[in-house]
Amino acid sequence: MSSLLPGNYPALLEEIKGRIRAARYEPLKPANKELIALYHDIGRMIAERRKYSGGVKSVIEKLAADLENEFPWMRDFSSQNLWYMCRL
């Protein structure tokens, strides 16, 4: 069967696969922008409160546990990720 395929078939296949991947990613771009803005905002909120209170480590660990409990399908709110958000 492969002998019936034109020589440029692999290139055609790669081009189509690339278009499919791009089309699948395109609708996610606005959501990704919103998530990045959300992470930045969460980091800002934590950083602002850090100025006024001590024990930031315990606050972040508690936030991580509470957020992961509330949103178990999201893997974004580990204590390490919350620290990263504070650095954005």
Image (cartoon, rainbow, N blue to C red):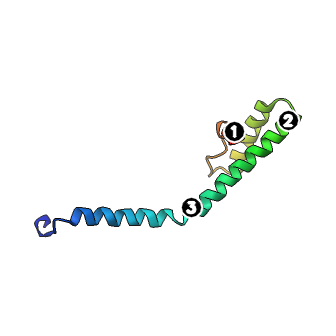
Quadrant of the rendered structure where residue 53 is? top right
Return the x and y of residue 6 as percentages of the image width and height.
Answer: 16, 69
Of the residues shown, which amino acid type is indicated by label 2? Lys
Q: Is residue 30 above or below residue 82?
A: below
Q: Amino acid at mark 1?
A: Arg
- Percent across and percent down for residue 35 are 65, 55
Q: Is residue 85 above or below residue 26?
A: above
Disc 1 is placed on an element classified as helix
Single out the residue that lies furthest toward the right: 52
Q: Residue at x 85, y 35 (%)?
A: 51
In this rendering, the answer to whether 70 lies above or below 5 is: above
- Label 1 near label 2: C-beta < 8 Å? no
Residue at numbered disc 3: 29
User: Position of 23 compared to 27: left or right?
Assistant: left
- In the displayed image of the protein, which residue is found farthest to the left? 3
The image position of residue 50, as x and y in percent, is: 82, 36
Q: Which mark is residue 51?
A: 2
Q: Residue at x 20, y 65 (%)?
A: 8
Q: Residues within 10 Å of mark 2 (few under 14, many from 20)?
A: few
* Other residues around mark 1 within 10 Å, as few (<14) / some (14–19) / many (≥20): few
CB contact under 8 Å: marks 3 and 1: no
> Which of the image's four quarters has the C terminus?
top right
Residue under circle 1? 87
Q: Earlier in the sequence, mark 2 or mark 1?
A: 2
Q: Is residue 63 above or below residue 54?
A: below
Report how far apart the C-alphas of labels 2 and 1 lie in the structure.
14 Å
Choose the circle earlier in sequence order: 2 or 3.
Answer: 3
Q: Residue at x 66, y 39 (%)?
A: 84
